Amino acid sequence: MFSRIMKQSDKIGLPPGTLMHIGEKQDRDVRISVIDYDEENYREKDITRLEECLPLKETPTVSWINIDGIHNPEVIKTLGEYFDIHHLVLEDVMNTGQRPKLEDFTTFNYVVLKMLYMDEGSIVSEQVSVILGPHFLITFQENDIDVFDMIRDRLRNSKGRIRKLGCDYLMYALVDAIVDNYFIILETFAERIESMEEMVISDVSRDTLQEIHNIKREMVFLRKSIWPLREVTSQLERGDSDLIDEKTEVYFRDIYDHTIQIIDTVETYRETVSGLLDIYLSNLSNRMNDVMKTLTIFASIFIPLTFVAGIYGMNFEYMPELGFRWGYPVLLVVMVTVGLGMASYFKRKGWF
């Protein structure tokens, strides 16, 4: 996060639309793949020259151009010139700190989403930028890992209605895949929270507290990534854009319902995690009280014994008990009796 803040400062004073990559540094080459299809035909290939994308702008088929890697300004600039994409949009594409949003530029729609997936037990966030045109759909990803494999399989095997409909339905399918993957993330959180509920009761340690804070921090990040999606899906399902067919609006309405459900679940989990923190602090306080109670009981038992020992530890010359032959054992018996008596009294009171 701090590297992105430092990178943002590098743009201060630059003209609007200056292409500068803001995000995790990448050393690999940009990979460009194209899927061109209609109901009868299907073609998929990786391209090495951007000039091959130019004819796809006017073809009547649906063309999905996927860019894996947004760190090369020349690639982004050239592609933007080919498809008449506004330079401010290209600037946002290269800035991975964007919040989910939808912008309508009449000739194309620009959508920003956060794609989340699990990698070795941790959540990975990747920004996905989608540009919807009349006959083309361009997606920009930070790397070549995504959740679109099922969409590609449906296109290859012509399953469902995806090959029969246009670019707007393809965008719906991609957004739906991203949103559906949020449910997998939430299931993972549900399992972690459930295990934490048991751990908070049985294990009051720094590791438990650290895990609670980790979950709480990740829930904040998850909410920040998902909450703006509500506005995006609401705009899509209203059908304000001419590029989205009326038949597709009902599918975006389904995504909107899923988004509301996900947001409600996130809010519930956030409250649960806050409750776990309260339980942890309460349990820690109770354990501290038990320790203090035990110490107080021992101190209460030894106070009268210390008093007796203090009296007979004084060095006065005329103490009649000092000459008593059985004084020492009698005093020990008295002290043991007092200690046991107080312990018995505390036991009857249920103090230990």
Image (cartoon, rainbow, N blue to C red):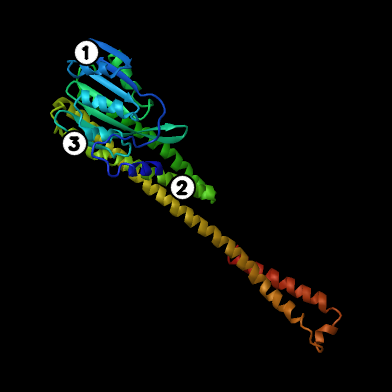
Q: Residue 200: horizontal and vertical position, in percent? A: 50, 49
User: Real-space Cα distance between discs 2 and 3?
Assistant: 36 Å
- Who is closer to the viewer here, 64 or 280? 64
Q: Are marks 1 and 3 in contact (CB under 8 Å)?
A: no
The span from disc 1 to disc 2 (Cα, nearest Å) is 51 Å
Measuring 31% from the left and 36% from the top, which residue is drawn there? 95
Could you give the CA–CA distance between mark 1 and mark 3, rounded to whole angstroms? 28 Å
- Residue named by callout 1: 39
Residue toward you, 25 or 151: 25
In the foreground, 324 or 258: 258
Q: Residue 314 appears in which quarter of the rendering?
A: bottom right
Above or below, comparing residue 201 to residue 144 in the picture: below
Q: Residue at x 26, y 25 (%)?
A: 78
Tag 1: amino acid: Glu
Q: Earlier in the sequence, mark 1 or mark 3?
A: 1
Neighbour class for label 3 at 10 Å: few (<14), some, many (≥20)? many
Across and down, in percent, residue 329 comes to: 82, 74
Sequence-earlier tag: 1 or 2: 1
Residue placed furthest toward the bottom: 318
Q: Disc 2 or 3, which lies upstream in sequence?
A: 2
Q: Secondary structure at mark 1?
A: loop
Q: From the image, which quarter does the C terminus lie in?
A: bottom right
Residue labelled with disc 2: 212
Q: Which residue is mark 3?
A: 235
Residue 259's tag is none
Residue 161 appears anywhere in the view: no
- Left or right: residue 11 compared with residue 106: right
Query: Which class describes the residues within 10 Å of circle 2: few (<14), some (14-19), or many (20+)?
Result: many
Tell me, yes or no, whether the two marked residues, 2 and 3, touch with CB atoms within 8 Å: no
Q: Is residue 178 above or below residue 338?
A: above
